[in-house]
Amino acid sequence: MTKISEDVVTIKRLRVCCASLGSARAPLMRRQLLIALILTCVSAWPQDSRAQEAVSSTSGGTSGTSNASSSATSTTDLSAGTSSASSPQAVSNAPSAANSLQTAPGGSGVFSPTPVQLYLSVFGGYDDNVNTNLGPKRGSEFVGGNAILDYTFGDPRLQIALNGGAGGNLYFENVNGQDYDIDLKGAVGITYKSTPRLTIGGTALLAYLTEPDFENPGGLNSRNGNYFYTNDKLFASYAWSRRFSTKTSYLFDAYQYNNSAVALYSNHVTNTFGNEFRFQLAPTTLLIAEYRYGIVSYQHEGEVTIPATIFMPAERLQLDSMSQYVLGGVDHVFNPRFSGSIRGGAEFRSYDAGGDRTGPYFEGTLNYAVGKRTSVSWNARYGIEEPEVVGAQSRTTFRTGLHAKFDLTSRVSSTFDAYYAHDDYHSDSNSTVPIVPFTENSFDIGLGIHYAITPMFGVQAGYHYTDVTSDAGGREYSRNRVTGGVSLKF
């Protein structure tokens, strides 16, 4: 604006000079002044344009948020765990693959010219401990297949990522009970910028599985029949000023097991309400203060888990609880390829049957696109979780995971997943048969490689390792799985 004002003043002064030289005896001077005026305006115009472009690339719109910070916000808002809508993830048959919005081989981005893609695969392999038993292992060959459908869409106001998969495995021998795995998943992420100040959206993950999942909080870490898991979130973000905004959210989380003995003490739902107060410290940095209120409700609360004897009364399930979280954190965009989100604070849990538990709480995610061929995402969480064990009131868990994708060449791509969980189980003082507190560690690692013979047809191979060590007897096991097969992409 300063430069434009100076030009206007200059033009006015030149007009006055031209008027004063209006006699017929000075035509040459008038032409010279006119040429000088034109050259001055032309030379000033590109400088102003470049200045305006620089401002528009770093400053936000009406809401006062920058383009860079908006990218960070959309990554956080669309994530059910750690994934963003701009990099939808595919569904696979790996034991820890109940990930929402994962990347399929050769998956497309939000603005891909072909937003719908279909992947088909058929494979076979060997599992050396199909029953996840402690002691002598019982292995089995297996065959399987899956189908994955991806759809992505994006424009300045609306972003959508859809992902669905159906598959399973069939084991040939040494299987106790069910000789097959079910792997059904569906995930969706939607963000809609309703007004320059208001953004609404949500994510939903629904999975019906047999294999344990080591990424999501809760659940069992060994095979215990089929189960249903869902993690769904709604949010509304509103910019009250250029620097201050709020984000209100609702999260629904549930586990439902088909095995009646497991379902009795494991089936539960969690409803969590939260509100964030967000301050734009810098164009790429948001400071967060957050409060959450969570309610855990067990399907079989109050029912008998251990029948009464002549020596003791019946043991009943009494684990319904209420939690309050007081958290602080930061969302930061380090550069266009690297972003992160961290929350930390305290959790205060109160049980309906009596008893309180307080502990630190932490969660964080990092997403880094190293280049066109490599991407890495990391997540971690520390807090109180549901115990899944009769006689335990809760467990304090630290869990962390890493997902990486490497395109070694234009034809060869690879994936790597690693998850670790450390559990400290706490005794239930209200129980008639409380457990002795114990510690458990779980490792889950997967490696896959894919070779594209043609753009549509390829071959693939994978290796998966799981190891659970525990202070409690009968809960430990290790497991190796190898697979190989072919794939089609449409």
Image (cartoon, rainbow, N blue to C red):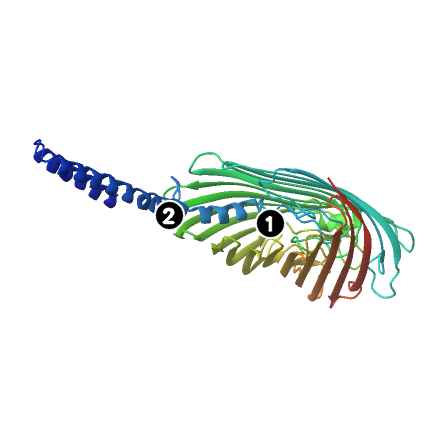
Closer to us: 211 or 250: 211
Quadrant assignment, res 477: bottom right
Examine the rendering and report whether any part of residue 84 can be seen.
yes
Question: What residue sits right under mark 2 in the picture?
Answer: 54
Closer to us: 140 or 222: 140
Of pointers 2 and 1, the one earlier in the residue sequence: 2
Residue found at x 87% / y 52% = 142
Examine the rendering and report whether any part of residue 169 can be seen.
no
Tell me the element at label 1: loop
Q: Amino acid at mark 2?
A: Ala
- Measuring from the top left, give residue 130's x and y in whole percent: 84, 56
Closer to us: 342 or 146: 146
Name the mark nearer the viewer: 2 or 1: 2
Tell me: 302 left or right of 331. right
Residue found at x 81% / y 55% = 483
**Few, some or many residues within 10 Å of mark 2 (<14, 14–19, 20+):** few
**Few, some or many residues within 10 Å of mark 1 (<14, 14–19, 20+):** many
Q: Amino acid at mark 1?
A: Ser
Between marks 2 and 1, how big is the CA–CA gap?
Answer: 30 Å
Disc ID at residue 83: 1
Tell me: 482 left or right of 80. right
